[in-house]
Image (cartoon, helix red, strand yellow):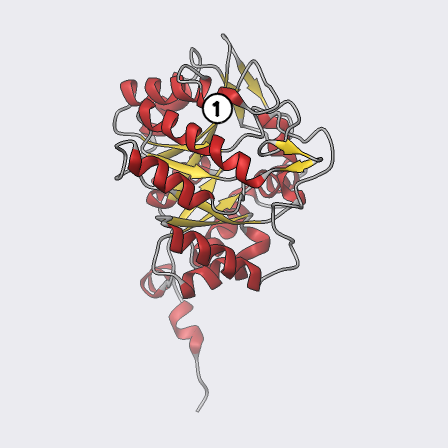
């Protein structure tokens, strides 16, 4: 007897019935770059279709996000002033805090998540306080607590610490619990690699380091088991969602987390992954829509429950057509 697996591939309807994984709008978080200033709507050359907005120009973008029924946005703030410590991150009238208040007032049903880090706010572009040409882990934790409390007071729905500081989740959880925000969830960038795929993001967020790199605190791309250790620490410290970043080159890590943790697993489809598809499509080398959908579906198949992606609007438009 021949095993005829093709029987269940014969028509689109039977393929739909036996499809194991489905991508939905409910899976998506859309990143937004909000810059301090006025009348700013600047396209990021290395990320076609993605822009920096000031608060007075962002409503059109948010209107579209809401109309497409995308459930959540992840905010990155770009301040007008930077210093060695990134003190604007805990300024209650800073760009991130004002953005949170603006969105929650005008788009109350949109779920707002803030990236919690320092690289966009420090004059040196690193993710914390610098001592002896490296990020001082424990000194940075003190400022992380100030930052999340300020975001919480502004009304954010979730915080997402991305700096890969040891002990950051326990520090943030304690700070929130002790200041009246025990129900505010944490989505941890639990497994974040020191990746070359972040290049276009640094154009978008003006966050490239002025010296060295981030390999002393972000993970070595060669390591797999270390990802489980990192995620285990964050799980034990109280993270509500565990994230893998980047996504496409780290599908094995997404599956590892899905197999080992009873928490929602997120992944970040990062700027370089987005830019490559856009560039190849612009040259006529690939079918952009099919490659986009296939790439994101691979993340779902690997085990991601949540996908942070610059493709969110494009994906939603495709899904709403079906």
Question: Can residue 23 be seen at all in this image of the molecule?
Answer: no
227 horizontally vs 200: left or right: left
Image coords of residue 180 (percent x, y) = 25, 32
Image coords of residue 228 (percent x, y) = 50, 61
Quarter location, residue 163: top right
Image coords of residue 177 (percent x, y) = 29, 38
User: Label 1 crowding class (10 Å Cα cut-off): few <14, some 14-19, many 20+?
Assistant: many
The residue most toward the right is 211
Q: Which of 6 and 124 is in front in this view?
A: 124
Q: Nearer the viewer, residue 10 or 198?
A: 198
Q: Name the residue under label 1.
A: 89
Quadrant of the image for the C terminus?
top left
Image coords of residue 171 (percent x, y) = 42, 41
Determine the secondary structure under disc 1. Answer: helix
Quarter location, residue 284: top right
Relative to 6, residue 86 above or below: above
Quarter location, residue 185: top left
Relative to 264, residue 124 above or below: above
Quadrant of the image for the N terminus?
bottom left
44 horizontally vs 176: left or right: right
Relative to 255, residue 174 above or below: above
At a point 50% along the width and 40% down the height, the residue shown is 162
């Amino acid at each position: 007897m021949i095993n005829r697996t093709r029987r269940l591939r014969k028509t689109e309807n039977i393929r739909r019935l036996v499809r194991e994984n489905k991508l939905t709008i409910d899976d998506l978080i859309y990143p937004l770059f909000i810059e301090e200033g006025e009348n700013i709507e600047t396209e990021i050359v290395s990320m076609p279709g993605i822009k920096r907005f000031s608060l007075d120009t962002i409503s059109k973008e948010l209107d579209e996000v809401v109309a497409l029924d995308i459930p959540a946005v992840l905010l990155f703030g770009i301040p007008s002033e930077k210093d060695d410590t990134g003190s604007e991150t805990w300024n209650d009238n800073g760009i991130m805090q004002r953005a949170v208040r603006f969105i929650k007032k005008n788009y109350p049903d949109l779920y707002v998540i803030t990236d919690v880090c320092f690289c966009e706010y420090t004059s040196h572009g690193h993710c914390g306080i610098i001592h002896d040409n490296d990020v001082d882990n424990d000194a940075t934790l003190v400022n992380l607590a100030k930052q999340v409390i300020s975001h919480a007071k502004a009304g954010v729905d979730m915080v997402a610490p991305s700096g890969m500081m040891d002990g950051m989740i326990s520090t943030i959880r304690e700070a929130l619990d002790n200041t009246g925000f025990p129900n505010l969830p944490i989505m941890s960038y639990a497994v974040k690699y020191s990746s070359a795929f972040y290049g276009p993001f640094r154009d978008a967020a003006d966050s490239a380091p002025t010296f060295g790199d981030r390999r002393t605190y972000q993970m070595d791309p060669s390591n797999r088991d270390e990802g489980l250790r990192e995620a285990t620490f964050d799980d034990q410290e109280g993270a509500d969602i565990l994230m893998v970043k980047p996504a496409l080159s780290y599908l094995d890590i997404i599956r590892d987390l899905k197999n080992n943790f009873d928490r929602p697993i997120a992944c970040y489809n990062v700027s370089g992954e987005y830019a490559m598809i856009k560039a190849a499509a612009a040259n006529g080398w690939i079918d952009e829509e099919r490659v986009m959908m296939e790439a994101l579906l691979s993340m779902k198949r690997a085990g991601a429950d949540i996908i942070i992606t610059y493709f969110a609007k494009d994906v939603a438009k495709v899904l709403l057509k079906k």
